[in-house]
Amino acid sequence: MGEPEPPMTPGAWTIPSQVLTEFYDDSAVLLDTETLEYLELDDTAAAMWRAISSTETAEAALDQLLALYEAPRDVVAADLQRLADWLVEAGYLMAAGAPSATEIPRPTAPSNTGDGGAGSAPPADLRDAYIELLMRSLCGVTQASLPIPTAQQPLAHLGHRAHGTDLPPHAMTMIGLQRMRNIRDLVATVLAEDIPGDLMECGVWRGGATIFMRGLLRAYGVQERSVWVADSFVGLPSTKTDEFPLDQEWTPMTGALAVPLETVRRNFAVFDLLDEQVKFLPGWFADTLPGAPIEQIAVLRLDGDLQESTWSALEALYDRVAPGGFVIIDDYVFESCRQAVEDFRLERGIDDPIQHADWTGVWWRKGA
């Protein structure tokens, strides 16, 4: 009679650095911050993932699960192994010793070198790490930026937060990682190609996108460009539906999304990015933008939602966008914004192709 087989123990794994986790009461969400794909795990799978992520060995993970479930060891081990195999195949887990995935290539801007002063850029690897951390922090998808939930303010869904499909209770921006990457890539392009002009956003909410713009200039050691922060700081304007009929749907939201100027300034200061390169333009776009002291714009980002706000910003600022510069429209999914963009492009004869950043953000590059 042969020896009995030893109890089954699953293999060992490691969690890729780009995978973030958020646990909820009876579930969990795993987010791949590179691909922005995410998985929702039910209560049992979430318990298994918690065991995997909170222990050093597969044996310890199995012991943790055996303390929770009254089931034979070999049954729990087999279930754990099946989940792990599925997660490995999906890219959320790696077998121990497996090579890390290749990082997605990113555009590069010139690296200013100097004596280490304020205008010097850090080495490229440190620069990219800072940019990535700043971007995730502003979007509210780093582990450190995820707050303790309360009954009044439950945690945002990590996957929805990454895609910018929610109204986050804590994050500095609504726009999600893909649209933040769009800002990163276009700013890197204008720096690499020496396209002249400042960076600007019209409609800033808590300031996240403009904080990111200022952080990009800091990361690349750029001192001669400014970041313009244009907003009413008292919420959405009253609608003029006789002139802009598509703004009718926004009428009930007059005053919504208000974030005071001092709060936005404080948000810049939290990230040590409030300085003389940040310029604030408080007031309604139709009043402040035509006479704004901005000579040239390299990247113009519009996030005004309304037909009137989008039209006013384009009319006042488009001629100041440098040839080769970029125009980003955040709210293209809304008919009010989209119609203003289409009408303006038609009136001006603009045929530069519109590119999609994600489900709502678009951009185009201004031709000569």
Image: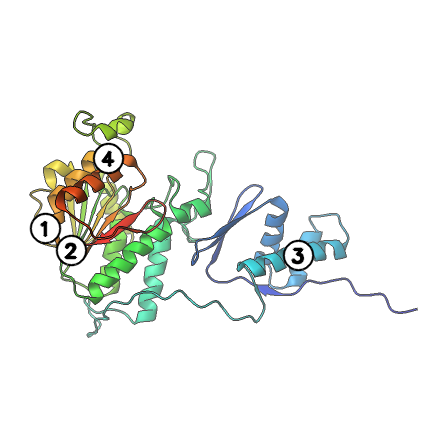
Mark 1 / mark 3, whichever is N-terminal: 3
Q: What residue would you read off at disc 3?
A: 82
Question: Residue 294 has which mark?
Answer: 1
Mark 2 / mark 4, whichever is N-terminal: 2
Dots 2, 4 in contact, CB < 8 A: no
Q: Quadrant of the N terminus?
A: bottom right
Mark 3 / mark 2, whichever is N-terminal: 3
Whether residue 218 appears in this view of the structure is: no
The local crowd at label 3, few if under 14, some if 14 to 19, many if 20 or more residues have their Cα within 10 Å, is few
Distance Cα–Cα, label 1 vs label 3: 59 Å
Q: What residue would you read off at disc 4?
A: 306
Q: Is residue 68 above or below residue 243?
A: below
Q: What residue would you read off at disc 2?
A: 198
Distance Cα–Cα, label 1 vs label 2: 8 Å
Dots 1, 2 in contact, CB < 8 A: yes
- Where is residue 198 shown, x and y percent of the image? 15, 55
Q: Amino acid at mark 2?
A: Asp
Please tell me which residue lies in front, 86 or 367.
367
Mark 4 / mark 1, whichever is N-terminal: 1
Whether residue 106 appears in this view of the structure is: yes
Left or right placement of residue 133 versus residue 101 in this view: left
Dots 3, 2 in contact, CB < 8 A: no
